[in-house]
Amino acid sequence: MDKISDLKQIVFKTLDNNKAQNIVIIDLKDKSSMADYMVIASGTSSRHIQALSEQVLEMLKNNGIKNSKIEGIDSNEWKLVDGIDIIVHIFHPEKRKFYELEKIWSELIPKEKLII
């Protein structure tokens, strides 16, 4: 396995071990140039969402992704952990349903790659 694929599994395990809900991994390799994978998960409260994002950030840094960071630090309803090749969204369930990222990114995009 390659490093990014291994990292994707470590992100999943970190979220799962810390009781994240409804963890979904979306392969972006043929859909976007912004990352190889997007991981989406739900937390049960603002504290849980914050704790999950901090756990993922620490895990990424411990695995050599030193430039990773948390976006949405002031939000109680969502966090984005930018792991360069892996983007992790952690939402409150209502916000997750509102944005429907799984639906947007799971749909097939025409042959040309989306560049963001």
Image (spheres, grey):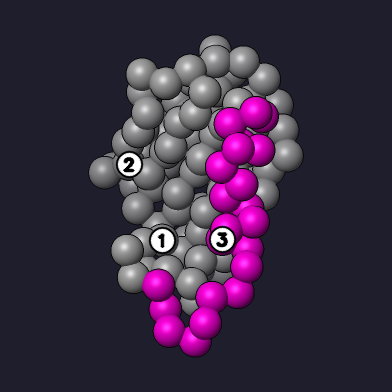
Occupied quadrant, residue 113: bottom left
Report the side of 110 relative to 32 (left or right): right
Does any portion of residue 18 appear in the rendered image? no
Q: Is residue 38 above or below residue 57?
A: below
Quadrant where the C terminus sits is bottom left
**What are the residue bounds of the magenta stretch?**
93-114
Picture layout, residue 81 above or below residue 33:
above
Q: Which residue is mark 2?
A: 68
Q: The residue under label 3 is which amino acid type? A: Trp
Q: Nearer the viewer, mark 3 or mark 1?
A: 3
State the image coordinates of residue 59 (x, y, percent, origin top left): 46, 36
Q: What is the number of the mark on residue 105?
A: 3
- Amino acid bearing label 1: Ala
Residue 106 among magenta residues: yes
Residue at point 36%, 62% (across, down)? 34
Q: Is 48 drawn above or below residue 112 in the view shown?
A: above
Disc with the residue nearer the chain's start (3 vs 1): 1
**Residue drawn at point x = 54 percent, y = 75 percent:** 109
Please name the residue shown 37% across and 44% down the image: 82
Between the C-alphas of marks 3 and 1, the distance is: 12 Å
Which label sits in the foreground, 1 or 2? 1
Judging depth in this view, the residue of 36 and 94 nearest the camera is: 94
Label 2: few (<14), some (14–19) or many (≥20) C-alpha neighbours in 10 Å: some
Query: Regarding mark 1 in the picture, which secondary structure is present there?
Result: loop
Q: Which residue is mark 1?
A: 35
Disc 3, SS: helix
x and y percentages locating residue 41 in the rendered image: 62, 38
**Which tag, 3 or 2, sits closer to the chain's start?**
2
